Amino acid sequence: AGFDMDLGGDDITSVQYQNANNSVRVNDEFMTAVETAGKFGLRSRLTGEVIEEVEAKSLFRKMAEAAWACADPGIQYDDTINNWHTCP
């Protein structure tokens, strides 16, 4: 009984995350790679090591197309938010 909540399961498109607000946090390094059509290293949250390199402009385009199609993901400009923060 219940729903298949696996990201590859059949129920994912109808139930899970339907009321979620998904955002992607990007930094200045990523945006520079987008502007210069460079590669960007995706890092492990645990170790900080680069686990995969992607074409930044292509990934940014995919994020934009997804946001246009369904309003997610939102984009958080991490370095800008931190630079503009008024409380150190």
Image (cartoon, rainbow, N blue to C red):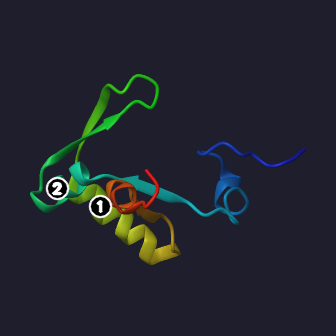
Mark number displayed over residue 60: 1
Q: Earlier in the sequence, mark 2 or mark 1?
A: 2
* Rendered location of residue 46, percent (x, y): 46, 25
Residue at 67% x, 52% y: name it: 10
Sort mark 1 into few (<14), some (14-19) or many (20+) by Cα contacts within 10 Å: some
Q: Residue furthest right?
A: 1
Mark number displayed over residue 32: 2
Residue at 36% x, 27% y: name it: 48
Q: Quadrant of residue 26?
A: bottom left
Q: Is residue 32 left or right of residue 21?
A: left
Mark number displayed over residue 81: none
Q: Quadrant of the N terminus?
A: top right
Q: Amino acid at mark 1?
A: Phe
Q: Quadrant of residue 64?
A: bottom left
Residue at 16% x, 56% y: name it: 32
* Rendered location of residue 58, percent (x, y): 24, 58
